[in-house]
Amino acid sequence: MWAASCLASCCAACACDACRTVVSGISRRSARIAYCGLFALSLVVAWMLREVAAPLMEKIPWINHFHQTPDREWFETDAVLRVSLGNFLFFTILAIFMIGVKNQKDPRDSIHHGGWMMKIICWCILVILMFFVPNGIISFYEATSKFGSGLFLLVQVVLLLDFVHGWNDKWVGYDEQFWYMALLVVSLVCYVATFSFSGLLFYLFTPSGHDCGLNTFFIVMTLIFVFVFAVVTLHPSVSGSILPASVISLYCMYLCYSGLASEPRDYECNGLHKHSKAVSTSSLALGLLTTVLSVVYSAVRAGSSTTLLSPPSSPRAGSGKPLLPLDKADEHHEEAEKSKPVTYSYSFFHLIFSLASMYSAMLLTGWSTSVGESGKLVDVGWPSVWVRIITSWATAALFIWSLVAPIIFPDREF
């Protein structure tokens, strides 16, 4: 007993020292990586609790106060939502606290980039406290998360449009034949991939012998959007480039696939059901990893967007600087740079993580409607299908608007 107690004390001390070492190594230039790591950790915790916490939560009286104990899936969903709510509150508090930070002399700038031990402790406390709040608050957060997830997807689309237009402008700006050929090659590859993808969708999601009119409608609508993109882009009045049109076409087709793949596994028109009767842990881990990478990319990209986040008094974010610089060669200039304006909005950066917390909770719970087999899959169910399809249509509408808006409103800058 004494030896076990000593061993536990040594392990705890080593863990604390390791955490302190990692936290002390987080610098101003790696702060955004740290926020992404903390967010990714929250998703891993939510996923683990979804798998193992249900039996324990059934015994908590203020959670399981029902006359008849709900199904296991209810407790799995509840665990994910409680972790998500703690994560949401953590980043929302930071977003509110960082409102109005203009330059690096502001004391809140050091809080944004430092104090990581205290931040991690506060994050843990918030997540733990969420398991003591009433079920009514969790239900309200669940309903609110659906709207927050829609906002996050909208931001994701705007960031993608900003990225593809910036990519095209940069290559065209070189004004060399090599880069024009590169534009043509990439565009052709994207269109070939788009039409090949559409053929695969027809094969998988419109099987013969079944009435799959809805799936056919989704795929055909996406192909119509691809055709419209090309026509509008090549119109003499628009003078657009084929690269953004091809990339957005491929992305819309991917969203269509993502929506169709999220159909319930017992749906006769879902051609993936034959391969998904038993979902292994590795498949679940791959799905979660994809979700993490997508959400983290959107949040970090938002932190350096040239269209969304640059405060009026600051230089444009990402102006010739890498997104996540890791070198320490110029750390001795840090004090001299404190008077400089911030390069992105800290408040909006944390707000993106708040919305991403809602979005990831919806993915892990199948938009809080998964039952039975679907409850064991990430992002499966009819709500998920319609969210992906509507996101695809919104992407198409925003891209077309980005092309025609300068013509309709020539006096405005877009």
Image: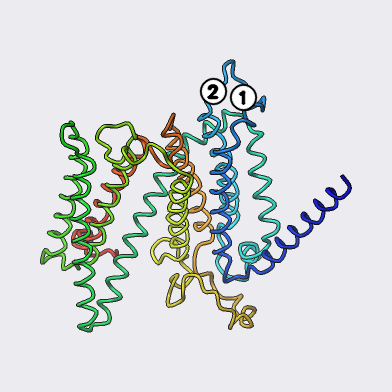
CA separation, marks 2 and 1?
8 Å
Vertical arrangement, residue 287 with respect to residue 322, above or below: above
Badge number at residue 64: 1
Sooner in the amino-acid sequence: mark 2 or mark 1 = 1
The picture quadrant where one finds residue 249 is bottom left
Residue occupying the point 18% across, 40% down: 216
Q: Nearer the viewer, residue 193 or 88?
A: 193
Which residue is at the far left?
236
Residue occupying the point 59% across, 32% down: 54
Vertical arrangement, residue 104 with respect to residue 271, above or below: below
Badge number at residue 70: 2
Q: Quadrant of the C terminus?
A: bottom left
Task: State if disc 1 and disc 2 touch (CB < 8 Å).
Answer: yes
Helix, strand or loop at label 2? It is loop
**Residue 147 is at least partly visible in this image:** no
Could you tell me the amino acid type at mark 1? Asn
Helix, strand or loop at label 1? It is loop
Numbered circles on residues, count: 2
Could you tell me the amino acid type at mark 2? Pro
Q: Nearer the viewer, residue 374 or 90?
A: 374
Q: Quadrant of the N terminus?
A: top right
Residue 338 x, y percent position in the rendering? 61, 75
The picture quadrant where one finds residue 275 is top left
Label 1: few (<14), some (14–19) or many (≥20) C-alpha neighbours in 10 Å: some
Left or right of residue 404, residue 99 in this image: right
Residue occupying the point 83% across, 48% down: 4
Q: Nearer the viewer, residue 121 or 259?
A: 259
